[in-house]
Image (cartoon, grey):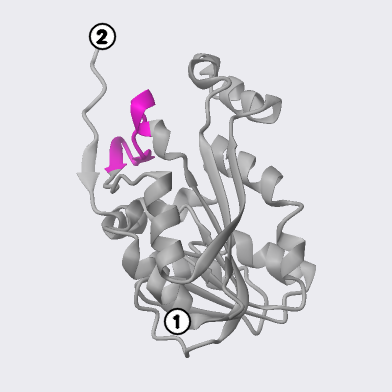
Amino acid sequence: MSECPAPTLLPAQQAYRLWAPEYDTSPNPLLSLEERLLAPLLPLAGGCDVVDLGCGTGRSIVELARIGARSIVGVDFSREMLEYAAKKVPAGVRLVEADCRDTRLQPQCCDWIVASFLLSYLDGLTAFAEEAARICRQSAFVLITDVHPAARSYGWKRTFRSSRSVVEIQTHPYGISGLHGAMQQAGFELVYLKEAGFGPEELTIFSRAGRPDLYGAVENLPVLLIAGYQRDCA
């Protein structure tokens, strides 16, 4: 029996260049869980000017447009992911190729920020928090999702298949308290926190892939972090 090849470790920008063509079609239980849990939260962005940091192929943008965001800007450092986003986001959405810690957007340009599965790829959270504060208006809301920081203790790695090889995406560990500290220092207050585990909907995805054992290994453990922060009104 041949052994599975060891994953090739790549920086996030290089990895997403390879993943972009299959990102939207690859079954992903974490994305399924996120979509379910954000369903009651995203409608709060209706009528707002929204910036989607780390927008990828535009998953959140499509939903934000559907619920009636006033304007939407998607920012990502992967040109390839943005090319796929451009094929499906509505007219009027602006897509910007930039680092989410230095977006080059105008100051105080948004009421809402979405950052989905982004923070693990950033080396340090301070620059992200400061950039979010710079582009936010007073009382703006920042909605962050990510693989739960505890997932590293489960032996999780961020991997995907590209052709016949396995790619591991380089990540930077952080703690929830460190995230709260960086956001508080930048002028944000924590107003929502959820540490969620998989549900029956995700078990279906694992089962179809022939790996219900992977679901069982983390059943009742947190796998997804959702944090919401409000910009200080003062």
Whether residue 181 is visible: yes
| Nearer to us: label 2 or label 1 | 1
Q: What residue sits 35% from the left and 72% below the top?
A: 101
Q: Quadrant of the C terminus?
A: bottom right
Amino acid carrying label 1: it is: Arg
Image position, residue 102 (x, y; %) = 34, 78
Name the residue that disc number 1 marks. 134
Q: Is residue 179 above or below residue 154?
A: below
Q: What residue sits 72% from the left and 56% below the top?
A: 41
Q: Is residue 209 above or below residue 183?
A: above
Residue 206: which quarter of the image? top right
Q: What residue sits 58% from the left and 21% below the top?
A: 220
Mark number, residue 1: 2
Q: In the figure, is residue 65 to the left or right of 119?
A: right
Is residue 155 inside the magenta stretch? Answer: yes
Mark number, residue 156: none
**Mark 2 vs 1, N-terminal side:** 2
The part of the chain drawn in magenta is: 152-168
Q: CA distance from mark 2 to mark 1?
A: 55 Å
Which residue is at the far top?
1
* SS assignment at label 2: loop
Q: Is residue 207 above or below residue 1?
A: below
* SS assignment at label 1: helix
Which residue is at the far bottom?
106
Amino acid carrying label 2: it is: Met
Of 162 and 180, the residue lying toward us: 180
Q: Number of labelled discs? A: 2
